Amino acid sequence: MKHRIVVLGAGYAGAVSAGFLARQLHADDFEITVVNAEPDFVERLRLHQLAAGYDLRHRPLAEMFAGTGIQLRVARVLEVDAGRRNVTIAGDGGIDQLEYDTLLYALGSTIADHGVPGVEEFGFHVASRPAALRLRARLDELGEGAEVLVVGGNLTAIEAATEIAESHPGLQVSLVTRGELGGWLGPKARRHLLRAFDRFGIAIYENTTVTRVEQHTVSTGDGSVFTSDATVWTAGFAAHPIAAAAGLAVAADGRITVDRQLRSVSHPDIYVAGDSAFVIGDNGRELPMSCASAGFTSTQATASIIGDLTGREIAAAALPYVGNHISLGRRDGILQLVDGEARSRRGAVCGRPAARVKSAIVGLSGWAVGRPNFGKLRHHYRAVRETSTELVAR
Ligand SMILES: Cc1cc2nc3c(=O)[nH]c(=O)nc-3n(C[C@H](O)[C@H](O)[C@H](O)COP(=O)(O)OP(=O)(O)OC[C@H]3O[C@@H](n4cnc5c(N)ncnc54)[C@H](O)[C@@H]3O)c2cc1C
Protein backbone atom coordinates (compact mmCIF):
# COMPACT_ATOMS: atom_id res chain seq x y z
CA MET A 1 0.00 0.00 0.00
CA LYS A 2 1.32 3.39 -0.96
CA HIS A 3 2.06 6.09 1.61
CA ARG A 4 -0.63 8.76 1.17
CA ILE A 5 0.50 12.37 1.25
CA VAL A 6 -2.29 14.93 1.17
CA VAL A 7 -1.44 18.58 0.51
CA LEU A 8 -4.09 21.08 1.54
CA GLY A 9 -3.92 24.26 -0.52
CA ALA A 10 -2.21 24.94 -3.84
CA GLY A 11 -1.05 28.51 -3.35
CA TYR A 12 2.55 29.71 -3.28
CA ALA A 13 3.47 27.18 -0.59
CA GLY A 14 1.32 24.13 -1.35
CA ALA A 15 1.70 24.04 -5.13
CA VAL A 16 5.50 24.25 -4.99
CA SER A 17 5.74 21.63 -2.26
CA ALA A 18 3.42 19.21 -4.04
CA GLY A 19 5.38 19.47 -7.27
CA PHE A 20 8.69 18.94 -5.54
CA LEU A 21 7.41 15.99 -3.51
CA ALA A 22 6.16 14.40 -6.72
CA ARG A 23 9.60 14.76 -8.28
CA GLN A 24 11.52 13.45 -5.30
CA LEU A 25 9.36 10.58 -4.08
CA HIS A 26 8.82 7.50 -6.20
CA ALA A 27 5.30 7.06 -7.52
CA ASP A 28 5.45 3.32 -6.75
CA ASP A 29 5.69 4.12 -3.04
CA PHE A 30 3.92 7.44 -2.58
CA GLU A 31 0.58 8.85 -3.65
CA ILE A 32 0.21 12.63 -3.59
CA THR A 33 -3.17 14.34 -3.56
CA VAL A 34 -3.64 18.11 -3.59
CA VAL A 35 -6.89 19.68 -2.45
CA ASN A 36 -7.59 23.25 -3.49
CA ALA A 37 -10.77 25.28 -3.42
CA GLU A 38 -10.16 26.79 -6.84
CA PRO A 39 -9.21 25.03 -10.08
CA ASP A 40 -6.48 27.61 -10.73
CA PHE A 41 -3.28 28.66 -9.08
CA VAL A 42 -4.25 32.15 -7.96
CA GLU A 43 -1.49 34.75 -7.79
CA ARG A 44 -2.55 36.24 -4.52
CA LEU A 45 0.08 38.97 -4.78
CA ARG A 46 -1.98 40.44 -7.60
CA LEU A 47 -5.43 40.34 -6.02
CA HIS A 48 -5.53 44.08 -5.32
CA GLN A 49 -4.77 44.53 -9.02
CA LEU A 50 -7.62 42.17 -9.91
CA ALA A 51 -9.95 44.19 -7.70
CA ALA A 52 -8.77 47.38 -9.40
CA GLY A 53 -9.73 46.05 -12.84
CA TYR A 54 -6.70 44.17 -14.18
CA ASP A 55 -7.04 40.54 -15.21
CA LEU A 56 -4.99 37.65 -13.86
CA ARG A 57 -3.42 35.05 -16.10
CA HIS A 58 -5.45 31.85 -16.08
CA ARG A 59 -3.25 29.12 -14.57
CA PRO A 60 -5.16 25.83 -14.31
CA LEU A 61 -3.71 23.56 -11.63
CA ALA A 62 -4.63 20.53 -13.73
CA GLU A 63 -2.20 21.77 -16.40
CA MET A 64 0.47 22.68 -13.85
CA PHE A 65 0.36 19.21 -12.34
CA ALA A 66 -0.04 17.32 -15.64
CA GLY A 67 2.48 14.51 -15.91
CA THR A 68 3.56 14.73 -12.26
CA GLY A 69 1.29 11.96 -10.97
CA ILE A 70 -0.31 14.38 -8.50
CA GLN A 71 -4.03 13.86 -8.04
CA LEU A 72 -5.91 17.13 -7.88
CA ARG A 73 -9.16 17.49 -5.96
CA VAL A 74 -10.89 20.80 -6.55
CA ALA A 75 -12.81 20.99 -3.32
CA ARG A 76 -13.14 23.01 -0.16
CA VAL A 77 -11.54 21.60 2.99
CA LEU A 78 -14.17 21.58 5.71
CA GLU A 79 -12.47 19.74 8.50
CA VAL A 80 -9.29 17.93 9.48
CA ASP A 81 -9.53 15.02 11.89
CA ALA A 82 -5.97 14.85 13.16
CA GLY A 83 -6.70 11.82 15.32
CA ARG A 84 -8.22 9.65 12.58
CA ARG A 85 -5.95 11.21 9.95
CA ASN A 86 -8.62 12.21 7.53
CA VAL A 87 -9.86 15.36 5.84
CA THR A 88 -13.46 16.18 4.99
CA ILE A 89 -13.84 18.00 1.69
CA ALA A 90 -16.75 19.39 -0.30
CA GLY A 91 -16.55 19.49 -4.08
CA ASP A 92 -18.86 19.22 -7.06
CA GLY A 93 -19.46 15.57 -6.21
CA GLY A 94 -20.60 16.44 -2.67
CA ILE A 95 -18.93 15.70 0.65
CA ASP A 96 -16.04 13.24 0.68
CA GLN A 97 -13.31 12.08 3.04
CA LEU A 98 -9.64 11.67 2.27
CA GLU A 99 -7.36 9.61 4.45
CA TYR A 100 -3.73 10.52 4.81
CA ASP A 101 -0.53 9.17 6.30
CA THR A 102 1.25 12.53 6.01
CA LEU A 103 -0.48 15.89 5.74
CA LEU A 104 0.96 19.14 4.45
CA TYR A 105 -1.27 21.99 5.57
CA ALA A 106 -0.90 25.05 3.33
CA LEU A 107 -4.32 26.70 3.30
CA GLY A 108 -2.93 30.22 3.56
CA SER A 109 -4.86 32.86 5.44
CA THR A 110 -7.89 35.07 5.35
CA ILE A 111 -8.73 38.49 6.76
CA ALA A 112 -8.56 39.10 10.49
CA ASP A 113 -11.71 41.02 11.43
CA HIS A 114 -10.47 41.62 15.01
CA GLY A 115 -14.03 41.02 16.20
CA VAL A 116 -15.29 44.23 14.57
CA PRO A 117 -19.02 43.84 13.81
CA GLY A 118 -20.13 44.21 10.22
CA VAL A 119 -16.80 43.40 8.54
CA GLU A 120 -17.98 40.11 7.12
CA GLU A 121 -21.41 41.40 6.18
CA PHE A 122 -20.62 44.82 4.73
CA GLY A 123 -16.84 44.91 4.18
CA PHE A 124 -14.95 44.05 1.00
CA HIS A 125 -11.49 42.53 0.90
CA VAL A 126 -8.76 41.20 -1.38
CA ALA A 127 -7.59 38.09 0.48
CA SER A 128 -9.12 35.65 -2.05
CA ARG A 129 -10.07 35.75 -5.70
CA PRO A 130 -13.85 35.65 -5.14
CA ALA A 131 -13.53 38.51 -2.64
CA ALA A 132 -11.37 40.58 -5.00
CA LEU A 133 -13.89 40.05 -7.81
CA ARG A 134 -16.70 41.17 -5.52
CA LEU A 135 -14.81 44.37 -4.74
CA ARG A 136 -14.08 44.87 -8.42
CA ALA A 137 -17.78 44.63 -9.27
CA ARG A 138 -18.58 47.13 -6.52
CA LEU A 139 -15.93 49.62 -7.67
CA ASP A 140 -17.20 49.33 -11.24
CA GLU A 141 -20.72 50.26 -10.24
CA LEU A 142 -19.68 53.32 -8.22
CA GLY A 143 -20.11 56.70 -9.86
CA GLU A 144 -17.82 59.73 -9.93
CA GLY A 145 -17.06 61.04 -6.45
CA ALA A 146 -18.15 57.90 -4.61
CA GLU A 147 -16.20 57.16 -1.43
CA VAL A 148 -13.92 54.18 -0.86
CA LEU A 149 -12.59 53.70 2.66
CA VAL A 150 -9.59 51.41 3.09
CA VAL A 151 -9.10 50.14 6.65
CA GLY A 152 -5.54 49.25 7.70
CA GLY A 153 -2.09 50.80 7.57
CA ASN A 154 0.13 47.94 6.56
CA LEU A 155 1.29 46.43 3.26
CA THR A 156 -2.02 45.27 1.82
CA ALA A 157 -3.80 48.46 2.83
CA ILE A 158 -1.12 50.56 1.15
CA GLU A 159 -1.15 48.49 -2.02
CA ALA A 160 -4.94 48.32 -2.21
CA ALA A 161 -5.49 52.04 -1.58
CA THR A 162 -2.93 53.20 -4.15
CA GLU A 163 -4.02 50.66 -6.77
CA ILE A 164 -7.67 51.66 -6.46
CA ALA A 165 -6.88 55.38 -6.45
CA GLU A 166 -4.72 55.03 -9.56
CA SER A 167 -7.16 52.87 -11.52
CA HIS A 168 -10.31 54.78 -10.46
CA PRO A 169 -9.29 58.44 -10.35
CA GLY A 170 -12.93 59.49 -10.10
CA LEU A 171 -13.37 57.83 -6.71
CA GLN A 172 -12.49 59.49 -3.40
CA VAL A 173 -10.19 57.07 -1.61
CA SER A 174 -9.45 57.46 2.10
CA LEU A 175 -7.51 55.27 4.50
CA VAL A 176 -8.10 54.88 8.20
CA THR A 177 -5.62 53.09 10.44
CA ARG A 178 -5.31 52.60 14.17
CA GLY A 179 -1.57 53.30 14.07
CA GLU A 180 0.61 55.24 11.69
CA LEU A 181 0.41 54.55 7.99
CA GLY A 182 3.55 52.54 7.17
CA GLY A 183 4.86 53.47 10.61
CA TRP A 184 7.41 50.66 10.55
CA LEU A 185 9.15 51.98 7.42
CA GLY A 186 12.47 53.77 7.50
CA PRO A 187 12.39 57.60 7.14
CA LYS A 188 13.13 57.69 3.41
CA ALA A 189 10.50 55.09 2.55
CA ARG A 190 7.86 56.72 4.74
CA ARG A 191 8.43 60.14 3.20
CA HIS A 192 8.04 58.58 -0.21
CA LEU A 193 4.88 56.77 0.86
CA LEU A 194 3.25 59.93 2.17
CA ARG A 195 4.17 61.82 -1.00
CA ALA A 196 2.58 59.06 -3.08
CA PHE A 197 -0.64 59.18 -1.05
CA ASP A 198 -0.69 62.92 -1.50
CA ARG A 199 -0.21 62.58 -5.26
CA PHE A 200 -3.08 60.08 -5.47
CA GLY A 201 -5.26 62.34 -3.33
CA ILE A 202 -5.81 59.65 -0.71
CA ALA A 203 -6.90 61.13 2.64
CA ILE A 204 -5.20 59.51 5.66
CA TYR A 205 -6.73 59.16 9.13
CA GLU A 206 -4.16 57.78 11.56
CA ASN A 207 -4.52 56.63 15.18
CA THR A 208 -8.17 55.90 14.53
CA THR A 209 -9.65 52.52 15.43
CA VAL A 210 -12.62 51.22 13.49
CA THR A 211 -15.25 49.74 15.80
CA ARG A 212 -18.14 48.98 13.44
CA VAL A 213 -18.72 48.61 9.72
CA GLU A 214 -22.17 49.19 8.25
CA GLN A 215 -23.44 49.32 4.72
CA HIS A 216 -22.67 52.99 4.15
CA THR A 217 -20.82 54.05 7.29
CA VAL A 218 -17.82 53.14 9.39
CA SER A 219 -17.72 54.09 13.07
CA THR A 220 -14.53 54.63 15.04
CA GLY A 221 -13.49 54.51 18.68
CA ASP A 222 -13.37 58.30 19.05
CA GLY A 223 -17.03 58.58 18.00
CA SER A 224 -16.44 59.72 14.41
CA VAL A 225 -18.47 58.25 11.59
CA PHE A 226 -17.09 57.99 8.06
CA THR A 227 -19.41 57.60 5.12
CA SER A 228 -18.31 54.91 2.68
CA ASP A 229 -19.67 53.37 -0.51
CA ALA A 230 -17.15 50.54 -0.34
CA THR A 231 -15.21 49.67 2.80
CA VAL A 232 -12.09 47.65 2.03
CA TRP A 233 -10.93 45.64 5.03
CA THR A 234 -7.14 45.23 4.89
CA ALA A 235 -6.43 45.26 8.61
CA GLY A 236 -4.35 42.09 8.79
CA PHE A 237 -4.60 38.38 8.16
CA ALA A 238 -5.38 35.34 10.30
CA ALA A 239 -5.18 31.64 9.58
CA HIS A 240 -8.37 29.76 8.72
CA PRO A 241 -10.10 28.32 11.82
CA ILE A 242 -9.80 24.75 10.45
CA ALA A 243 -6.46 24.14 12.18
CA ALA A 244 -7.63 25.21 15.63
CA ALA A 245 -10.84 23.21 15.21
CA ALA A 246 -8.71 20.14 14.44
CA GLY A 247 -7.11 20.44 17.85
CA LEU A 248 -3.69 21.44 16.51
CA ALA A 249 -1.59 23.72 18.68
CA VAL A 250 -2.06 27.20 17.24
CA ALA A 251 -0.90 30.75 17.94
CA ALA A 252 -3.31 33.59 18.77
CA ASP A 253 -3.92 34.33 15.10
CA GLY A 254 -4.78 30.69 14.33
CA ARG A 255 -1.46 29.82 12.69
CA ILE A 256 -0.20 26.33 13.44
CA THR A 257 2.77 26.31 15.82
CA VAL A 258 5.59 24.33 14.23
CA ASP A 259 9.15 23.33 14.97
CA ARG A 260 12.17 24.36 12.83
CA GLN A 261 11.37 21.48 10.46
CA LEU A 262 7.83 22.83 9.99
CA ARG A 263 6.18 19.94 11.82
CA SER A 264 3.18 20.75 13.98
CA VAL A 265 4.39 20.74 17.58
CA SER A 266 1.24 18.89 18.65
CA HIS A 267 0.89 16.54 15.62
CA PRO A 268 4.30 15.81 14.06
CA ASP A 269 2.75 13.92 11.12
CA ILE A 270 1.30 17.26 10.00
CA TYR A 271 3.67 19.65 8.26
CA VAL A 272 2.78 23.27 7.64
CA ALA A 273 3.93 25.84 5.09
CA GLY A 274 3.08 29.39 4.08
CA ASP A 275 0.76 31.75 5.92
CA SER A 276 -0.62 28.91 8.05
CA ALA A 277 2.71 28.29 9.80
CA PHE A 278 3.75 30.02 12.99
CA VAL A 279 7.50 29.53 12.91
CA ILE A 280 10.47 31.29 14.40
CA GLY A 281 12.75 32.55 11.65
CA ASP A 282 16.52 32.83 11.52
CA ASN A 283 16.41 36.21 13.28
CA GLY A 284 14.75 34.66 16.35
CA ARG A 285 11.38 36.28 15.60
CA GLU A 286 8.22 34.93 14.11
CA LEU A 287 8.36 34.80 10.34
CA PRO A 288 5.78 37.20 8.89
CA MET A 289 3.11 35.96 6.52
CA SER A 290 4.49 36.71 3.08
CA CYS A 291 5.16 35.19 -0.28
CA ALA A 292 8.86 34.97 0.54
CA SER A 293 8.07 33.18 3.81
CA ALA A 294 5.82 30.81 1.84
CA GLY A 295 8.80 30.00 -0.38
CA PHE A 296 11.17 29.41 2.53
CA THR A 297 8.72 27.41 4.63
CA SER A 298 7.60 25.24 1.73
CA THR A 299 11.24 24.50 0.94
CA GLN A 300 11.84 23.45 4.54
CA ALA A 301 8.58 21.54 4.95
CA THR A 302 9.22 19.61 1.75
CA ALA A 303 12.76 18.74 2.79
CA SER A 304 11.47 17.60 6.18
CA ILE A 305 8.77 15.38 4.70
CA ILE A 306 11.24 13.77 2.31
CA GLY A 307 13.78 13.29 5.09
CA ASP A 308 11.27 11.84 7.54
CA LEU A 309 9.76 9.48 4.97
CA THR A 310 12.94 8.26 3.31
CA GLY A 311 15.54 8.51 6.06
CA ARG A 312 17.52 10.98 3.95
CA GLU A 313 19.20 13.82 5.82
CA ILE A 314 16.88 16.79 6.23
CA ALA A 315 18.34 19.78 4.44
CA ALA A 316 18.11 22.97 6.51
CA ALA A 317 16.49 25.71 4.44
CA ALA A 318 17.05 29.33 5.41
CA LEU A 319 14.12 31.07 7.11
CA PRO A 320 15.12 34.71 6.70
CA TYR A 321 13.10 37.90 6.77
CA VAL A 322 14.68 40.28 4.34
CA GLY A 323 12.27 43.15 3.87
CA ASN A 324 9.23 44.38 1.98
CA HIS A 325 8.59 45.20 -1.63
CA ILE A 326 5.58 47.45 -1.83
CA SER A 327 3.77 48.59 -4.94
CA LEU A 328 2.20 52.06 -5.06
CA GLY A 329 0.06 51.65 -8.13
CA ARG A 330 1.68 50.31 -11.28
CA ARG A 331 4.58 52.73 -11.71
CA ASP A 332 5.77 53.49 -8.19
CA GLY A 333 6.99 51.40 -5.30
CA ILE A 334 9.18 51.03 -2.24
CA LEU A 335 11.86 48.47 -1.51
CA GLN A 336 12.45 48.45 2.23
CA LEU A 337 15.06 46.09 3.65
CA VAL A 338 15.19 45.21 7.34
CA ASP A 339 18.11 44.46 9.64
CA GLY A 340 18.72 41.36 11.76
CA GLU A 341 16.27 42.67 14.37
CA ALA A 342 13.53 43.05 11.73
CA ARG A 343 13.85 46.85 11.94
CA SER A 344 13.63 48.86 8.74
CA ARG A 345 16.94 50.19 7.51
CA ARG A 346 17.20 53.93 7.03
CA GLY A 347 17.65 53.74 3.29
CA ALA A 348 15.23 52.37 0.75
CA VAL A 349 14.76 52.19 -2.97
CA CYS A 350 11.77 54.25 -4.04
CA GLY A 351 9.99 55.07 -7.26
CA ARG A 352 10.20 53.33 -10.61
CA PRO A 353 13.25 51.10 -9.90
CA ALA A 354 11.39 49.68 -6.88
CA ALA A 355 8.25 49.21 -8.98
CA ARG A 356 10.28 47.29 -11.56
CA VAL A 357 11.87 45.03 -8.92
CA LYS A 358 8.47 44.41 -7.36
CA SER A 359 6.95 43.55 -10.69
CA ALA A 360 9.84 41.15 -11.41
CA ILE A 361 9.40 39.48 -8.02
CA VAL A 362 5.67 38.98 -8.52
CA GLY A 363 6.30 37.56 -12.00
CA LEU A 364 9.11 35.27 -10.80
CA SER A 365 7.09 34.03 -7.84
CA GLY A 366 4.24 32.99 -10.13
CA TRP A 367 6.68 31.43 -12.59
CA ALA A 368 8.50 29.49 -9.86
CA VAL A 369 5.30 27.88 -8.62
CA GLY A 370 4.96 25.96 -11.87
CA ARG A 371 8.57 24.78 -11.77
CA PRO A 372 9.38 23.45 -8.33
CA ASN A 373 13.07 22.84 -7.84
CA PHE A 374 15.11 23.58 -4.73
CA GLY A 375 18.13 24.83 -6.62
CA LYS A 376 16.18 27.22 -8.76
CA LEU A 377 14.07 28.48 -5.89
CA ARG A 378 17.06 29.10 -3.67
CA HIS A 379 18.76 30.82 -6.54
CA HIS A 380 15.67 32.92 -7.18
CA TYR A 381 15.40 34.16 -3.60
CA ARG A 382 19.14 34.76 -3.37
CA ALA A 383 19.03 36.76 -6.59
CA VAL A 384 16.14 38.87 -5.29
CA ARG A 385 17.93 39.50 -2.02
CA GLU A 386 21.18 40.43 -3.73
CA THR A 387 19.45 42.77 -6.19
CA SER A 388 17.60 44.45 -3.34
CA THR A 389 20.74 44.88 -1.24
CA GLU A 390 22.62 46.28 -4.20
CA LEU A 391 19.88 48.78 -5.00
CA VAL A 392 19.61 49.95 -1.40
CA ALA A 393 23.37 50.40 -1.16
CA ARG A 394 23.37 52.74 -4.18
C1 LIG B 1 -3.63 41.58 -2.17
C2 LIG B 1 -2.45 40.91 -1.55
C3 LIG B 1 -1.19 41.35 -1.88
C4 LIG B 1 -0.09 40.74 -1.31
N1 LIG B 1 1.16 41.21 -1.64
C5 LIG B 1 2.23 40.60 -1.13
C6 LIG B 1 3.53 41.04 -1.48
O1 LIG B 1 3.69 42.00 -2.22
N2 LIG B 1 4.59 40.38 -0.96
C7 LIG B 1 4.45 39.31 -0.14
O2 LIG B 1 5.44 38.73 0.30
N3 LIG B 1 3.22 38.88 0.25
C8 LIG B 1 2.12 39.49 -0.24
N4 LIG B 1 0.88 39.04 0.11
C9 LIG B 1 0.79 37.88 1.02
C10 LIG B 1 0.96 36.60 0.22
O3 LIG B 1 0.03 36.56 -0.82
C11 LIG B 1 0.78 35.39 1.12
O4 LIG B 1 1.69 35.50 2.18
C12 LIG B 1 1.02 34.09 0.34
O5 LIG B 1 0.05 33.96 -0.67
C13 LIG B 1 0.99 32.90 1.28
O6 LIG B 1 1.10 31.72 0.52
P1 LIG B 1 0.27 30.44 0.96
O7 LIG B 1 0.60 29.37 -0.01
O8 LIG B 1 0.42 30.20 2.40
O9 LIG B 1 -1.27 30.89 0.78
P2 LIG B 1 -2.06 31.15 -0.56
O10 LIG B 1 -1.18 31.61 -1.64
O11 LIG B 1 -3.20 32.02 -0.18
O12 LIG B 1 -2.61 29.71 -0.93
C14 LIG B 1 -3.57 29.06 -0.15
C15 LIG B 1 -4.37 28.15 -1.05
O13 LIG B 1 -5.29 27.41 -0.26
C16 LIG B 1 -6.57 27.45 -0.86
N5 LIG B 1 -7.55 27.34 0.21
C17 LIG B 1 -7.78 28.19 1.23
N6 LIG B 1 -8.76 27.72 2.02
C18 LIG B 1 -9.15 26.56 1.49
C19 LIG B 1 -10.09 25.56 1.87
N7 LIG B 1 -10.86 25.66 2.96
N8 LIG B 1 -10.22 24.47 1.09
C20 LIG B 1 -9.45 24.31 -0.02
N9 LIG B 1 -8.54 25.21 -0.41
C21 LIG B 1 -8.38 26.32 0.33
C22 LIG B 1 -6.63 28.77 -1.60
O14 LIG B 1 -7.57 28.70 -2.66
C23 LIG B 1 -5.19 28.91 -2.09
O15 LIG B 1 -5.02 28.31 -3.34
C24 LIG B 1 -0.24 39.65 -0.42
C25 LIG B 1 -1.52 39.20 -0.10
C26 LIG B 1 -2.62 39.83 -0.65
C27 LIG B 1 -3.99 39.33 -0.30
Image: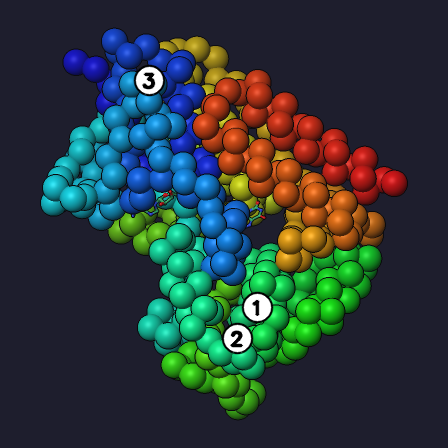
Q: CA distance from mark 1 to mark 2?
A: 10 Å
Q: Secondary structure at mark 3?
A: loop
Distance from disc 3 to disc 1, alpha carbons, whole Å, reads: 43 Å
Question: Residue 72: horizontal and vertical position, in percent?
Answer: 27, 31
Q: First in sequence: mark 1 or mark 2?
A: 2
Residue drawn at (35%, 69%) of the image: 120
Look at the numbered discs 3 and 1 and tell me whether their residues touch, using CB distance below 8 Å. Answer: no
Q: Is residue 22 left or right of residue 180?
A: left
Q: Amino acid at mark 3?
A: Gly
On the image, numbered disc 1 is attached to which residue? 168
- Seen in the picture, residue 71 relative to 267 is either above or below; the reply is above
Among numbered discs 3 and 2, the one appearing first in the sequence: 3
Q: Looking at the picture, does residue 20 appear above or below residue 48?
A: above
List the residue tagged with mark 2. Answer: 148
Q: Residues within 10 Å of mark 2 (few under 14, many from 20)?
A: many
Instruction: Report the residue marked by disc 3.
Output: 67
Can residue 10 be seen by looking at this rendering?
no
Within 8 Å: ligand 1 and the Cβ of disc 1? no
Percent x, y for residue 34?
30, 32
Do callouts 1 and 2 mark residues in contact (Cβ within 8 Å)? yes
148, 127: nearer the viewer: 148
Q: Is 207 rendered above or below residue 31?
A: below
**Residue 296 as seen in the image, left or right of residue 83:** right
Give SS at disc 1.
loop
Q: Is residue 189 visible?
A: yes
* Quarter of the figure with residue 201: bottom right
